[in-house]
Amino acid sequence: MPPTAGRADRRRNRERLLAAAAEVFGRDGAAAPLEEIARSAGVGSATLHRHFPSRRDLLEAVCTDGVERLCVRADELAAEDDAEAALWTWLDELVRYASTTRGVVGVLLAEPPGPQRPLCQSSRLHDALEPLWARATAAGAVHPEAGVDDLLTLVNGISRVTDDDPEAGSRLLALLRSGVGSNHHRSATRG
């Protein structure tokens, strides 16, 4: 077999594994059995592990396109005049995406990346959020103690409880933004 045929087979197997993983994770969540993914792709477990040595590696690869779209969107929003609106628009888009991945993005946000990981979606999301957060913080639109990691943790929590319901995730994020239980709301109801 010519070397290019081997590379083509390897590429096809990888593509089939990613398609099967997206389908299985989308149906069964981030903890779905890897053997099920290999079976759905029509390959053996050894082939899956050659391409993706760990579950995290597979989860990272499955999220590549979605995270890339979010990173591009963060760059677009960073150019807008209203820093507060830009930040919350992006966080809403992130929570909606995370809510539709059945826990996949949540796992990536909750677990710190390993050493020398060639692909780290949580780091990419952190880097995309940082300029939006910095602009909103400078504008006084974010609590001074709320950092980038705090915002990502909040989005992760919302996405985990609204698994597969992006509308509910968006609603909870809006409640968070408005400050449920804040002094403003308490004084308005006493008035």
Image (spheres, rainbow, N blue to C red):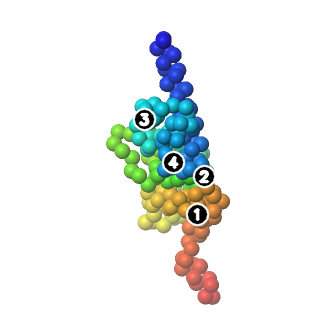
Q: Which mark sits nearer the N-terminus, 3 or 1?
A: 3
Question: How far is the residue under mark 2 from the one under mark 3?
Answer: 26 Å
As shown in the figure, which amino acid type bears the numbered disc 4? Answer: Ala
Q: Earlier in the sequence, mark 1 or mark 2?
A: 2
- Nearer to us: label 1 or label 4: 4
At mark 3, the secondary structure is helix
C-alpha gap between disc 1 and disc 4: 27 Å
For residue 123, the mark is none
State which tag comes first along the sequence, 1 or 4.
4
- Nearer-N-terminus badge (3/4): 4
Marker disc for residue 100: 2
Q: Which one is nearer the viewer's eye here, 130 or 160?
A: 160
Mark on residue 173?
1
Q: Residue at x 55, y 26 (%)?
A: 12
What percent of the width, then of the height, locates residue 103? Answer: 52, 53
The amino acid sitting under disc 2 is: Thr
Residue that label 4 marks: 32
Q: Residue at x 36, y 44 (%)?
A: 114
Question: Disc 1, disc 2: CB below 8 Å?
Answer: no
